[in-house]
Amino acid sequence: MIRRALISVSDKQGVVELGRALARHGVEILSTGGTAAALMAAGVAVTQVSTFTGAPEILDGRVKTLHPKVHGGLLGRATEGHRTEMSRHGIPPIDLLVVNLYPFEATIGRPVSFDEAIENIDIGGPAMIRSAAKNHERVTVVVDPADYDKLELPAGPSAERRLALARKAFAHTSAYDAAIAAYLSSLDDRVAIDRSATPVRNPLPEVLGVQWRRRYDLRYGENPHQVAAFYADAKSPLPGGPPRPTIAGAEVLGGKQLSYNNILDLDAALGLALELAEPAAVVVKHNNPCGVAVDREVAAAYRRARDADATSAFGGIVAVNREVDEALAKALVETFLECVIAPAYSAAARDVLAAKKNLRLVAATGDWRAPTNDLAWSVRTIAGGALVQTVDHGMVDLAQAKVATKRAPSTAERADLAFAWRVGKHVKSNAIVFAKGGVTLAIGAGQMSRVDSVRICERKAGDKLAGSAVASDAFFPFRDGVDVLAAAGATAVVQPGGSVKDEEVIAAADEHKLAMLMTGMRHFRH
């Protein structure tokens, strides 16, 4: 039975309703500070923790709940020995703890002084959570307002539910401590002297704590003999919440469960779709785009992207950056596809797509503009460790790129180069992208030689490459790559530059009367 509860929350969402529900069942409520004030203002009877312990809050509120009467009430077991000892020391049991912590990550997410960040490190809260979670055989601990409706008053939740809430509680304090450790290890030692300054943070801290929450098990991994599950960043909201669309935060509206390989391909398709502001469609196969296009209408963009490499589009993954309407849905069902991801689907589109029972429909809500948060991390594991880098949000405006050749690109060529350059950022190295008029003509990906990437494009598209623009994700080490793409019909090329053979490469471009831009920024994708 829940007879006594201690409530102390930073996030006040739902706390008044919870307090009223507890009061209706005769539960004694202990509370502190702002939580107590909110409950009392709503007419809920509250006993201040300082009254309960007989000890005042001290040290500017740093010490409120660090008291034997609080932790004894949480840690005492339902054994005869513990009950006797608690009675002797005047420690009544606390059956329910509802705590969420000072918003440390929200605080350091804005420019704050080191002192302010330190003051937003919660001490009493994590200590109580750990005490209650350790003693979950008797005590219910709740750290998430979404779990307030799971208390099963007045009897209290089952042993299985208390265990589940304890697991969640320890994950909550673990993530909280990891965020503090990462913040402190990202700072220069000078903050120890000038604590009032807003510190400069290293985007790659010395200590990196990453916590993921399992969303669901997968049928298998890359191959049927591998066991796999899909995890989401534990700090990210579930479907409907993230400010930017992600696969982890997306909702599967129809079709079979996503597979391991589906998720990888959807992430690749979404990343490229986010780069494009116009109505756009991306077709991905095996983690590489095989067709990309923009147009005035998203249905037209999809048809152009699909037809750019119709053979590869079969069984592909499609991302569009506009709502799927009926016209697009009718085009989508013309080809066998594995998955479609979009911001939303109209009711008419859902009706059309329902005919494809196994087509996975994924809705990724959020801001579909290209992300620019350079502090986002990309984490890839290797045997015994991990590689961590900031996400590649870099993108050079080609209006600012250096014209390396005698001939500057025309207005139309500049537009094609800009489009191909954005696509090339999302193609596995060595990446070559031929494009014209807002659609890719051929894409060469993942080859050991850049020349081979060009030749693959030539073999796939042939005469269609006449008058096209080309993007290369990294520099041309020799002139042979330029010779081959010029022979294939290209008239303009964009590349980072930076090779010791740049002069030779530029001379080759001039010989072929190509226009060449150099960005100074490469986009390797391994």
Image: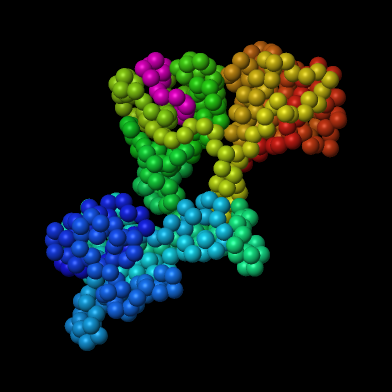
Q: Quadrant of residue 461?
A: top right
Seen at 32% across and 54% down, the residue is 12
Examine the rendered structure and indicate whether residue 214 appears above or below residue 396: below
Seen at 27% across and 51% down, the residue is 14
Quarter of the figure with the C terminus: top right
Instruction: Tell whether position 325 is magenta.
Output: yes
* Residue 475 in sight: no
Q: Nearer the viewer, residue 524 or 208?
A: 208
Residue 99: image x %, image y %? 33, 62
Seen at 19% across and 67% down, the residue is 28
Residue range in magenta is 317-332
Q: How many marks?
A: 0
Residue 347: image x %, image y %? 30, 22
Residue 516: image x %, image y %? 77, 24
Instruction: Tell whether position 17 is magenta.
Output: no
Colour option used: rainbow
Examine the rendered structure and indicate whether residue 317 appears above or below residue 51: above
Q: Is residue 353 left or right of residue 210?
A: left
Q: Nearer the viewer, residue 221 or 29?
A: 29
